[in-house]
Image (cartoon, rainbow, N blue to C red):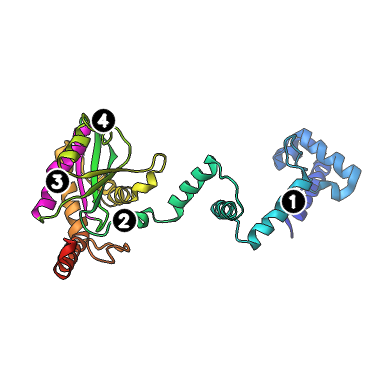
Amino acid sequence: MTAREQLIRARMGMLALAEQLQNISAACKRAGISRSHFYEIKAAFEKYGSDGLAPRERRRPRMPNETPPELVEKILEMRGVWVRHGLTLKFQRLLWLEQRTSAHGGILTEAHLRLLRQHRGRLTDPAQHIEAPRPGYLLCQDTYFVGTIKGVGKIYLQSVIDANCSLGFGKLYLSKVPMTAVDVLNDRVLPFYEEHNLAIEHLLTDNGRETCGKPLSHPYELYLAIQQIEHRRTQIGSPETNGFCERFHRTVKEEFFSVAFRRTLFESVDQLQRDLDAYLEFYNRERSHQGYRTKGRTPYQSFLDGIAAMRSETEVNPEAA
């Protein structure tokens, strides 16, 4: 029995009960409906018979701003064309527009170019477009807001990643002033590369205040100039160009911070830093990475392999040194 038939039978039974009891109020009480609803059902039965007891199909009102049916039909036809030509995704249509403009002439608006940059950053791996042929050639640096510790304050992570081997460094601070960006380099990064007799050639950052400013007065700019490190900046409005740091932040958040804050009630930034140092030791020397650069090796092993490859190339070709 369908739901429609069940409802008709129930309403017929209610009408019969009211006739048997000769008491509409008692029948309504047993059925759990109001007297006014009973009279609506009774009137429908008297006018249309049992078919009048079936639920009515409510017509959806047409809104003033509703798309006209003929336009809806055209849109559906257009969607079929998109499917046949592989243009169902916005990014696919943007690429088609870019190719057509290149082939037949025309101008892409700034809005089109901005959308292309955004979608390229989402659908491709931005790290693959960064040139980093050897360890130390390009390091990426960024600031990440960790969260707030009660009684301590806001916590920020200064992170630095070697784009060649994914080797990661990190230090926590209570602010994100320029000197914090300098300190992590001076305290953690440069000593490590000096220990391995390797120079840092380029540093990539976004355009934030802690890393960008007047070359002759900004602490970070001055520090890089003294260390003879070339400062590179990401494209404005395109944070995906610093994809190494973004991916590192996501990994550290999921594997360390989310777990650490559930297990431990930290009372100082130093306490959190000690646990972070232990995690980074695991991240760099024990955790295998499956990226196309590391290929299942740990970042530190990739770092050492890169140095070995550089030395081998120098022995074969001394002019490359």
Looking at the rendered structure, the kind of residue marked 4 is Lys
Find disc 1 in the rendering and name its residue: 74
Find disc 3 in the rendering and name its residue: 188
Q: Inspect the magenta stretch and tell me whether residue 200 lies in it.
A: no
What range is drawn magenta here? 167-195
Q: Is residue 86 visible?
A: yes
Q: Secondary structure at mark 2?
A: loop
Decide which of tag 4 and tag 3 comes sooner along the chain. 3
How far, Cα to Cα, is label 4 from label 3?
25 Å
Q: Residues within 10 Å of mark 1 (few under 14, many from 20)?
A: few
Q: Inspect the magenta stretch and tell me whether residue 176 lies in it.
A: yes
Q: Position of residue 65 (x, y in %)?
A: 72, 36
Identified at 12% across, 51% down, the residue is 192
How far, Cα to Cα, is label 4 from label 2?
26 Å
Q: Which mark is residue 315?
A: none
Q: Position of residue 201 (x, y in %)?
A: 21, 50
Find disc 4 in the rendering and name its residue: 214
Q: Are marks 4 and 2 in contact (CB under 8 Å)?
A: no
Q: Which mark is residue 131?
A: 2
Q: Secondary structure at mark 4?
A: loop
Looking at the rendered structure, the kind of residue marked 2 is Glu
